[in-house]
Image: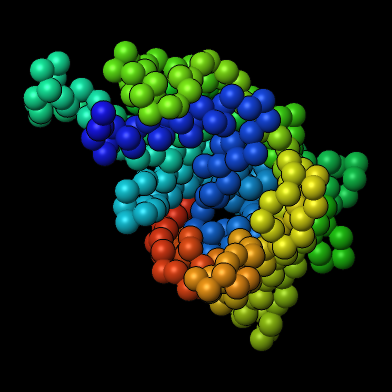
Amino acid sequence: MCFPIKTRFIVCAIVLCVSVANAQIAKYSNEFLSVGVGARALSMANANVASVNDVTAGYWNPAGLNLQQSNLQVGLMHAEYFAGIAKYDFIGGSKRLDSNSVAGITFIRFGVDNIPNTTELIDANGNVDYSRLKSFNAVDAAVLLSYARNMTKVKGLKIGANAKIIRRKLGEFAGAWGFGLDAGAMYDIQGWRLAAMARDVTGTFNAWTYNLSDDVKQTFAVTGNEIPANSVEVTVPKLILGVTRTWSLWENKLSLGGEVNFINTFDGKRNTVVKTKAWSMEPAVGLELGYKHFVFLRGGIGNIQKAKNVTGSDVTTVQPNIGVGIKYKIFALDYAMTNIGNVATSLYSHIFTVKIDISKKIIK
């Protein structure tokens, strides 16, 4: 029996969900939460857990919310991947509660919309009936509730935490609800800032449910795929360590900042610079040059991996990133251009972020 191409696409998408969900520990679970938010961070190759100081800290390191210089800040971001097929959006807000604490909320959505559903395109008599054509969305979304606080008894120490609610949905075929916690810290010492961000610190649990029609089940059976059953996946913790420092140059007209991150995973060997059977580590480096705190030029290198070229030889691939930013009074506009392929494959994405400080009040 031959099935339409779009039907096979739907089956493959569900099979991917099943292969993850049937395993108790999922190595690449909730990967949409690894993309990152904010054009500043993305232009610096996601090296941002130590230097983040705005509303995007709710994602990168909630402890950084206490570095924002206004009572209330909102941020918006839109990006498109794979020639506009996938849409990625972020909206966030953070509010200072008092001189030592800040609360924030972050919403993230990664989705492919209006996917044709051709599972019912052919009627019972074998005729193609386009009136039966429907569409569905494949959406991953998350809400992060953040809280940050200065530890007044330990000078220079800030801590923060996230509670995150996750919703993943593949049309009417499958869906999941998830919950997890993140924890972060920053420590300033002699001009340097050290940071740690523990994502999914308690493990993040996604409970999957499936609602498949008889036609889709038949397609699974004929193609030799397992019919999915309701199950739970677990995202294991990830630890990101970072260090940053900013230097003032040319009578304080120029600023030069840099950050290095070490992304540690504990779910077995990954294709990273350092890897063992139980632990893998990936570095990321970002730089930012500013002029009079008004215009900024940024760049970074991350996603360093070993791969094979067309001849079968080992090569090292990297993800280059560049960007610019402008800050004027209460408004900030950031732009990033990232290559989700590598230096040899042009898969560029253009990302914009707008941030607004409301009820501006500098926190001393």
Which residue is farthest bottom?
Answer: 250
Q: Where's residue 87, x and y in %? A: 37, 46
State the residue in front, 249 or 313.
Answer: 313
For this view, does 126 lie left or right of residue 6?
Answer: left
Q: Where's residue 4, x and y in %? A: 23, 35
Which quadrant would residue 48 be assigned to in this image?
Answer: bottom right
For this view, does 268 lie left or right of residue 307?
Answer: right
Is 98 above or below relative to 83? above
State the residue in front, 348 or 308.
Answer: 308
| Number of numbered markers | 0
Is 63 above or below relative to 192? above
Is residue 59 visible in the rendered image? The answer is yes
Q: Residue at x 57, y 70 (%)?
A: 312
Is residue 360 visible in the rendered image? The answer is no
Which quadrant would residue 202 be assigned to in this image?
Answer: top right
Which quarter of the figure is the N terminus placed in?
A: top left
Q: Residue at x 52, y 20 (%)?
A: 208
Q: Where's residue 26, x and y in %? A: 64, 33
Q: Residue at x 48, y 73 (%)?
A: 344
Is 299 above or below relative to 227? below
Q: Where's residue 225, x and y in %? A: 45, 27
Is 332 above or below relative to 316? above
Which residue is farthest front?
Answer: 1
